[in-house]
Image (tube, rainbow, N blue to C red):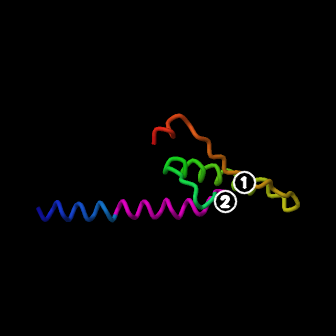
Amino acid sequence: FKRRVSANKKERRRTQSINTAFSDLRTAIPNVQPDTKLSKIKTLKLATKYIEYLMDILSKDDPSAMPSAFKAEIIKTKRDHRD
């Protein structure tokens, strides 16, 4: 019984830690309204696109060029309507 309670507590801490990390990641993605609900997979996809955007800017290495703003495109799919 004690092992199960300990395992449950450990799992709750792990889940809470992951959720906190995703919450922090959501705040780092620009142009997403704070009240927008993003699934974990959408958060990861947007973060990946934002990192690609930043890498592209860095690879151009042209200080005189003004980069276009990052646009977070949140597209609803059929699966989203079931969630």
Density class for disc 1 (Cα within 10 Å; few <14, some 14-19, many ≥20) is few
Where are the magenta residues, as a range?
14-32
Q: Is residue 31 magenta?
A: yes
**CA gap, disc 1 and disc 2:** 7 Å
Estimate the x, y position of residue 67 in percent, counting from the top left: 80, 56
Density class for disc 2 (Cα within 10 Å; few <14, some 14-19, many ≥20) is some
* Residue at position x 66%, y 46% in the image: 73
Q: Amino acid at mark 2?
A: Pro
Name of the residue lying farthest toward the right? 64
Q: Is residue 42 magenta?
A: no
Give yes or no for contact between labels 1 and 2 (Cβ–Cβ under 8 Å). yes
Q: What element does badge 2 sit on?
A: loop
* Residue at position x 36%, y 59% in the image: 15
Q: What element does badge 1 sit on?
A: loop
**Could you say which is closer to the camera, residue 25 or residue 36?**
36
Q: Is residue 10 above or below residue 59?
A: below
Numbered mark located on residue 70 in the image: 1
Helix, strand or loop for the magenta stretch, by majority: helix
Name of the residue lying farthest toward the top? 78
* Residue position marked by numbered label 2 in the rendering: 30
Q: Amino acid at mark 1?
A: Phe
* Residue at position x 24%, y 61% in the image: 8
